[in-house]
Image (cartoon, grey):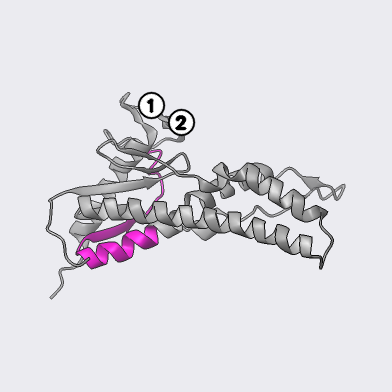
Amino acid sequence: MGQRPLRGRASPIDLGVRFEVATSDGQLIEADRPLLRSAERLAVAQRELATKRRGSGHRAKAAARLGAIHRKVANQRQDFAHQLSRSLVNHYDLIVHEALAITNMVRRPRPRKEKSTGTYLVNGANAKGGLNRSIHDAGWGQLLSFIAYKAEDAGRELIAVDPRFTSQRCSSCGHVEAANRCSQAEFRCRSCGHQAQADVNAAHNILRAGRARRELAPVKA
């Protein structure tokens, strides 16, 4: 698409599993979640595949139907990422996001054993598995990749910042406390009383960190 005219706008993007993106100007963009939408169809197709004899023509057809659903899910996720990344790059000159280690975030917790009995302890793997599926379904890595190459092509600036405490820090007074995040959706500062939608509060912190990093960046010769 090439260089685009500057608009003088900056935006952070706080990535989530319910809202794919939250911005500091209050935009909350719902995650598309194609895998969740297709979960029932996938379950039916997987059960059908499991009942078919290995090597049979019926099994090959069942495998093809399952594969077609997975391809449709992947295409829907990709289309959503393309549309959202294009919209962000078109509207903002500076885009700031958290430098997320997504591979580490979706790693399954290690099994834990009780030394005295040898039995396995509860390690939260089931809950973590649900979160991992949501992160994969949201396609954060794909979205960030699309934003990166489109931003470069359009002459936009993209900055990745340290994600630590962005969801716990008050964007009004700077107080950091885990209890500030009352729920998935609500932020209420225990120090100054500032209230905000939690993802929007985090987005303000991300933008502030991006601007600070921009100011500290060495000047290019």
Can you say which quadrant of the picture contains the N terminus?
Answer: bottom left
Residue 220: % across, % down: 15, 72
Check disc 2 and give the amino acid type: Ala
Residue 93: % across, % down: 19, 55
Query: Within the magenta stretch, is there residue 127?
Result: no
Residue at 38% across, 62% down: 145
Can you say which quadrant of the picture contains the C terminus?
Answer: bottom left
Say which of 94 and 91 sits in front: 91
Mark 2–mark 1 distance (CA, rounded to whole Å): 7 Å
**Do the CB atoms of the residues marked 2 and 1 lie less than 8 Å apart?**
yes
78 relative to 210 in the view: left or right: right
Number of marks drawn: 2
156 relative to 175 in the view: left or right: left
Residue 43: % across, % down: 69, 46
Q: Residue lying at the far right in this picture: please name it.
A: 117
Q: Is residue 100 visible?
A: no
Check disc 1 and give the amino acid type: Arg
Say which of 107 and 117 sits in front: 107
Residue 136: % across, % down: 53, 53
Name which quarter of the figure residue 200 lies in.
Answer: top left
Q: Residue lying at the far top in this picture: please name it.
A: 193
Tell me the residue that label 1 is attached to. Answer: 190
221 shown above or below 129: below
100 relative to 151 in the view: left or right: right
49 shown above or below 180: below
Q: First in sequence: mark 2 or mark 1?
A: 2
Residue at 59% across, 54% down: 69
Q: Which residues are magenta?
A: 144-169
Say which of 39 and 148 sits in front: 39
Residue at 79% across, 54% down: 50
Residue at 55% across, 42% down: 37
Q: Which mark is residue 179?
A: 2
